[in-house]
Image: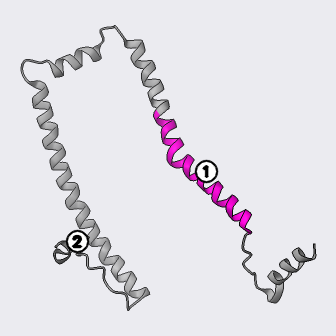
Amino acid sequence: MDDEATAIEPAVTKGKKAIVKPTEREDLTFNFLRFVLTFSERVIRPLGFVWLVGYFLADIFSSLAGKTTVANFLVEWFTESPSGVSFTINLGLTIVAVLWAIKERRHRLKKVEILGNRISHLEAQRDPNRTTSGLLTNGQTHPVDRT
């Protein structure tokens, strides 16, 4: 009992708070709990979500099994149309997606350049001796580093 009392007393001396290090058992318990929480966040939650969505989708499809519906008509019209409607729609959507991706990439590079200049300025204020990483201003790898 005296050992515990003496271990606590130095933490109160001189008006400063001393850092009390956890025991090995407390550290192991903390690491185990952190592992369990991380595992549940990264694995169990997504799997539970997939299971829940699958459960309700299976219920929806089982209620439509063997029935002719508007959805069935639309699927047949888009896939089996002799006029090539499905090919035209697919080609159009592909072109739109490619143009959108090009626009987003340009926008992202421009935004990285704008924010990169700001971050460089703030880092120079904090540490004037800081050196650059060698990336271009838009965040791309320097051509010399590619070889």
* Placement of the C terminus among the 4 image quadrants: bottom left
* Placement of the N terminus among the 4 image quadrants: bottom right
Secondary structure character of the magenta stretch overall? helix
Callout 2: SS: loop
Residue 129 position in % (x across, y down): 38, 91
Give yes or no for residue 37 being in the magenta stretch: yes
Q: Is residue 75 left or right of residue 35?
A: left
Identify the amino acid type marked 1. Answer: Val
Q: Residues within 10 Å of mark 1 (few under 14, many from 20)?
A: few
Residue placed farthest to the bottom in the image?
129
Residue 27, above or below 123: above
Q: Residue at x 23, y 66 (%)?
A: 110
Residue 17, above or below 83: below
Residue placed farthest to the left in the image?
83
Residue 50 position in % (x across, y down): 46, 35
Callout 1: SS: helix
Give yes or no for residue 97 being in the magenta stretch: no
Residue 41, above or below 64: below
**Residue at the spot of label 1:** 36
Identify the amino acid type marked 2. Answer: Thr
Q: Which residues are magenta?
A: 23-50
Q: Residue at x 11, y 29 (%)?
A: 87
